[in-house]
Amino acid sequence: MSEEPDKDAAEQGASLDPADWEVLKRSFHAAIDQAIDHLRDIRRQPVWRPTPEAVKARLRVPLPRGPEALDAVAARFAADILPYGTGNLHPRFFGWVHGNANPAGALGEALAGLMNCNVGGRDHVAVYVERQVIEWCKEIFGFPASSSGLLTSGTSMGTVIALAAARAAQAEVDVRKLGMAASPRPLVGYASSEAHSCVAKAFDLLGFGQEALRAVPVDSEFRMSLPLLREKLAADRASGFRPAIVVASAGTVNTGAVDDIAEIARLCRAEGLWLHVDGAFGGLAVLTPEFASRLRAIAEADSIAFDFHKWLHVPYDAGCVLVRDEAAHRAAFANRRDYLAPAKRGLAGGEPWFCDYGPELSRGFRALKVWFTIATHGIDRLAETIARNCRQARELGQAVQGESDLELLAPVELNIVCFRFLAPGLGAAALDRLNEAIVAELQLNGIAAPSTTRILGRAAIRVALTNHRTTGLDLALLLDAVRELGRSLAASAPAAEHASVGTP
Amino acid sequence: MSEEPDKDAAEQGASLDPADWEVLKRSFHAAIDQAIDHLRDIRRQPVWRPTPEAVKARLRVPLPRGPEALDAVAARFAADILPYGTGNLHPRFFGWVHGNANPAGALGEALAGLMNCNVGGRDHVAVYVERQVIEWCKEIFGFPASSSGLLTSGTSMGTVIALAAARAAQAEVDVRKLGMAASPRPLVGYASSEAHSCVAKAFDLLGFGQEALRAVPVDSEFRMSLPLLREKLAADRASGFRPAIVVASAGTVNTGAVDDIAEIARLCRAEGLWLHVDGAFGGLAVLTPEFASRLRAIAEADSIAFDFHKWLHVPYDAGCVLVRDEAAHRAAFANRRDYLAPAKRGLAGGEPWFCDYGPELSRGFRALKVWFTIATHGIDRLAETIARNCRQARELGQAVQGESDLELLAPVELNIVCFRFLAPGLGAAALDRLNEAIVAELQLNGIAAPSTTRILGRAAIRVALTNHRTTGLDLALLLDAVRELGRSLAASAPAAEHASVGTP
């Protein structure tokens, strides 16, 4: 190990850092400005456009061996990648439940990339920022100060973590050591038939098995039926199962239905069950005056998982899980070896470490983009975007009901509107195909991007309003386009598509 | 839904977008320039400094209700957050196994935040970028074109995903539906006693139970003992267990030991076991001429998990899992409902969807920072940083062996050097405390940040070289500081610390 300064300078030059930092800054400015211009002009762009075959081909090249100038790489990004995104920056993106991001959050993400913190543990500021964000979340949902939390990639991982805590707390043996097969009575859980698929995926991943998640039928408003939940609980107990977990939905993905969380919480307390709330998007409607009363009971849950990247518009990906019983949460994950031993002083301090609350040891500084988003806009303004989307959904639902060629397929509870175009003379299957074609055409023409689902077996055009850019004009334009496309597609449909009897 | 243009303009103004996009650009430039300056001047900064109590207090405020100007938030970031990071940007950060990021990767992360793609599925360019990155990874590890992969938060999640695929493939029943308790013979797996704790955590999470992971003792070079693996396999079969999985380490976290992957692969093939390789950091040494021959057998594994955020210096977090049998991978996770139905045309096309290969439905555009990193530097230059770190580790090991007051505690196989300072007259426990104190002082004084571990029960100063900024001078400075601190701490140690007999 030589100590001549010259040799060291040469060695420093071998790093991945730039030769000229001012040139680097200019590269950042230019590339970021292009991405900001793209965002500024988004209304003039199609909502979505297919990725050209030539671009796909340029993204199928062998592993590059030699270097390329950063500006050249950024130019390729601007030409081949920037224009062909998911579409969810656009004011007329209504598909699935996607947030739109916000510039403050994006700046937080950019700075996190430059800071490069590993927030698995240890004593550094990123840990304190994540704790701050978690405290804010406890405040939002009325969780006690003694509860714990973790930022996650989203509600899917949050659900896995919450149900792992539930599993460890509810099991009659040490399942962490002994596995799920050691349980004397099989653990089972309950969610409505409208619950998100991530709940069944978590039951699968954690080794309960998907069949251990009982699907409780819903009422006419797509909410979990409490009488049928009670029936299933009794039947399972009688058959030797151990009911352990109920998952309530605060906003189902199909229709935005909110289960009766207060009543389910009472039942869970009485029966000793772990109540988890899937609040992926809808949970945050607790911030609005209109929905606060219906969602306030989330505060009584044992855990909740929700997303920042949906209705708080933090850039993807960012979610959170809160667990009422910190000890139960930690007991489900803590497992450190010698090389991760904590220290009283120095960088290895900072207990508790986040890696003891989830499956990940290395963790990015996801909290920074959430911190930037909430600090810049303030929660009141973020809440107002949520309230506005709910108002827009209600108005859209009313507009649908006002047109004889449109049919509302589910009550508008929160921010989701499921409807279809009706064409005289089309049978059920043809009507399904027609509405699916309308959605495909809306997307392919770049007009709007709703998604599809099935409501009571019928194909629905599904409009989810988690979009801070959407205006009334955007929704009027959507309805006009649906009806126009519906009429023209129905007119050009082959004769065989038309039902042979009983229609005018 | 009114259509007057004025009303729409007002509604557009209600979004979370800025009133003036040029002002926004200036905010980005200023904040990013500060973070770049911090990086440029990193050598003049302490490796680590504790977060001041005043800063911690400012990160314990109630949920902000009102807005704050983005520049003001960025100024708070620059004052309170930027200086107090994990330390792993610094050339003398040697703790755990942390990468240092690179500016090109950070630019990719910034642009991903602005694009806000959700890469769970659908047909948009981010999907093609992630596929490109996965193809490059297959090329690096010699995996077949027919294999599958997924970008993850890191090796911990990659291990969960790989072992979930192994579980579904090896089980004698449909464990996804029926759960782990339905297995007629309990599934068990094997890893060396030096394997990373994420393997046991995965066995826990997936419901095998940690005891189902058998710890195979290591040889004198800390590699899994093949004869003892065979013994354990035979004993388990005789006792009615079903051996299902072997996890080989390509670079253990304690000492960087590489298991004999080729021999383990032969055994796994012969015995019908799933071979997973934990290549978190060490796997990528396959890119270097020196280690290629020892690591090439990774190509024979059924799965490998590894990190981009360690030795490829992609900003946190970014890892990857590859699975040889795409169908087995998909069969372990696919589970889509009506609202996620694929379409032949439009945005809902793009099969296969990444959400069918892992637990997450919403997924960020993590691939972009990897793509930027590899495209800008080229894999040859990234490989050279890996090779340089291994040379540095070897030289550091030799330097340790050249000093009578230092003791090397494990062979230097890859990039990790475990050693300790020796002080005459100190007993075993006092020597452990002394070396832990040396590491704490190195960190607290901002000189260097190695971490600690235990090697055969003895406290070790552990230097992991996954640092593209480290030079020979940095390592010389480290050794000087260790010896100086060691002498001064030993001199000031209370008399009781000194062993009463048998030392000069």
Image (tube, coloured by chain):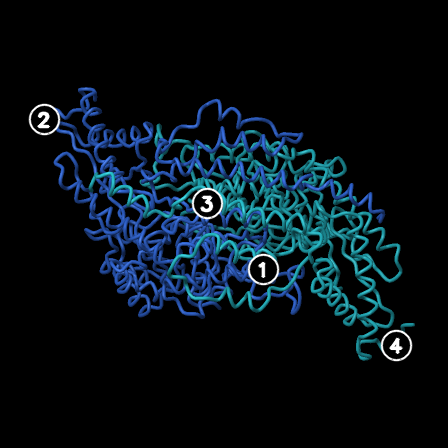
Chain colours: A cyan, B blue
Residue occupying image coordinates x 28% and y 45%: A10
Local crowd size for mark 1, using a 10 Å CA cut-off: few (<14), some (14–19), many (≥20): many
Evaluate whether label 3 is on the same chain as label 2: no
Q: Which amino acid does label 4 sit on?
A: Val
The picture places residue A368, in percent across and down from the top left corner, at: 53, 38
Query: In this image, B454 relative to A260: left or right?
Result: left
Residue on which disc 2 sits = B501
Q: Mark 4 lies on which chain?
A: A
Query: In this image, A395 relative to A254: left or right?
Result: right
Q: Mark 2 lies on which chain?
A: B
Alpha carbon of mark 3 to alpha carbon of mark 2: how far?
Answer: 61 Å
Residue on which disc 3 sits = A24
Q: In which quarter of the image is residue B73?
A: top right
Query: In this image, A473 relative to B132: left or right?
Result: right
Which of discs 1 and 4 lies nearer the camera? The answer is 1
Local crowd size for mark 3, using a 10 Å CA cut-off: few (<14), some (14–19), many (≥20): some
Q: Which amino acid does label 2 sit on?
A: Val
Q: Is residue A346 above or below residue A477?
A: above
The picture places residue A241, in percent across and down from the top left corner, at: 56, 52
Query: Residue B121's mark?
Result: 1
* Front-lying residue, B280 or A329: B280
Q: What residue type is labelled 3?
A: Leu
Residue on which disc 4 sits = A501
Q: Mark 1 lies on which chain?
A: B
Alpha carbon of mark 2 to alpha carbon of mark 1: how far?
Answer: 69 Å
Q: Which amino acid does label 1 sit on?
A: Gly
